[in-house]
Amino acid sequence: MSSPYTHEATTEVAELQAALKANGIILPSLGLDLPSVVMAYDTPLVELGNCNLDTARALTAALRKAAGR
């Protein structure tokens, strides 16, 4: 059994992945948190995963740029 939000969450993960890629950022572990997917009473969690320091710096820079800082 999966959450009724699983399709929506899968779509959102793909959108996030595309947005990150457009900024030159790849999070190899990006995906849905599987235990949260099978819980029918809550929305699935997005697991951002691990990244190296270069990726963390690129993500920080992209977020700061988007925030106008």
Image (tube, helix red, strand yellow):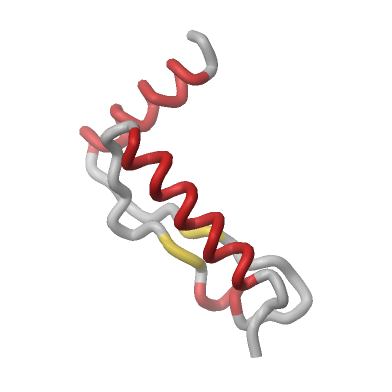
Q: Residue most toward the right?
A: 41
Q: Position of residue 42 (x, y in %)?
A: 74, 70
60 relative to 11, above or below:
above
Residue at x-position 39% and y-position 25%: 62
- Report the residue at 33% width, 59% height from top: 29
Q: Tell me residue 51's x, y (percent).
A: 28, 47
Q: Total number of numbered labels? A: 0
Q: Which residue is painted at 38% across and 55% down in the image?
A: 49
User: Could you say where residue 28 lies in the image, as x and y percent from the top left?
Assistant: 28, 56
Identified at 63% across, 64% down, the residue is 8
Q: Nearer the viewer, residue 54 or 7?
A: 7
| Residue furthest out toward the top | 69
Q: Is residue 52 above or below residue 4?
A: above
- Where's residue 32, x and y in %? 49, 66
- Depth order, front residue of 17/44: 17
Q: Where does the N terminus fall, quadrant-wise?
A: bottom right
Q: Is residue 59 left or right of residue 66?
A: left
